[in-house]
Amino acid sequence: MYDSDLSDEQWQLIAHHFEPKDNRGAVPIHSKRTKRLFTIF
């Protein structure tokens, strides 16, 4: 675990920002939480 990793409580506060607005596009391969972690690095 890295210092920049989110706790479950922190993730719950921002998770709604990563929800899709519609159903267009392919089914995601990676979880939204994992994608968020990759944006830091």
Image: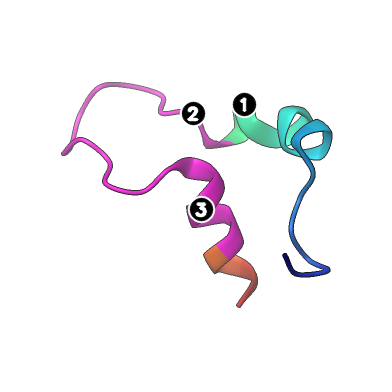
Provide the residue designation for mark 1.
16
Residue located 74% across and 59% down the image: 5
Residue located 75% across and 69% down the image: 2
Check the image and name the residue furthest to the front.
1
Provide the residue designation for mark 3.
34
Mark 2 crowd level (few <14, some 14–19, many ≥20, 10 Å Cα): few
Left or right of residue 17, residue 8 in this image? right
Q: Tell me which segment is drawn in magenta.
A: 18-37
Calculate the distance from the C-alpha at mark 2 to the C-alpha at mark 3: 13 Å
For marks 3 and 1, give the one nearer the viewer: 3
Check the image and name the residue furthest to the top.
22
Left or right of residue 20, residue 2 in this image? right
For the stretch drawn in magenta, the main secondary structure is loop
Question: In the rendered view, how is the structure colored?
Answer: rainbow
Q: Which comes before the other along the chain, label 3 or label 1?
A: 1
Q: Amino acid at mark 2?
A: Glu
Q: Amino acid at mark 3?
A: Thr
Residue located 41% across and 28% down the image: 20
Mark 3 crowd level (few <14, some 14–19, many ≥20, 10 Å Cα): few
Calculate the distance from the C-alpha at mark 3 to the C-alpha at mark 1: 14 Å
Residue 25 magenta: yes
Measuring from the top left, give residue 33's x and y in whole percent.
55, 45
Q: Secondary structure at mark 3?
A: helix
Q: Which comes before the other along the chain, label 2 or label 3?
A: 2
Calculate the distance from the C-alpha at mark 1 to the C-alpha at mark 2: 5 Å
Residue 17 sits in which quadrant? Answer: top right
Left or right of residue 30, residue 5 in this image? right
Provide the residue designation for mark 2.
19
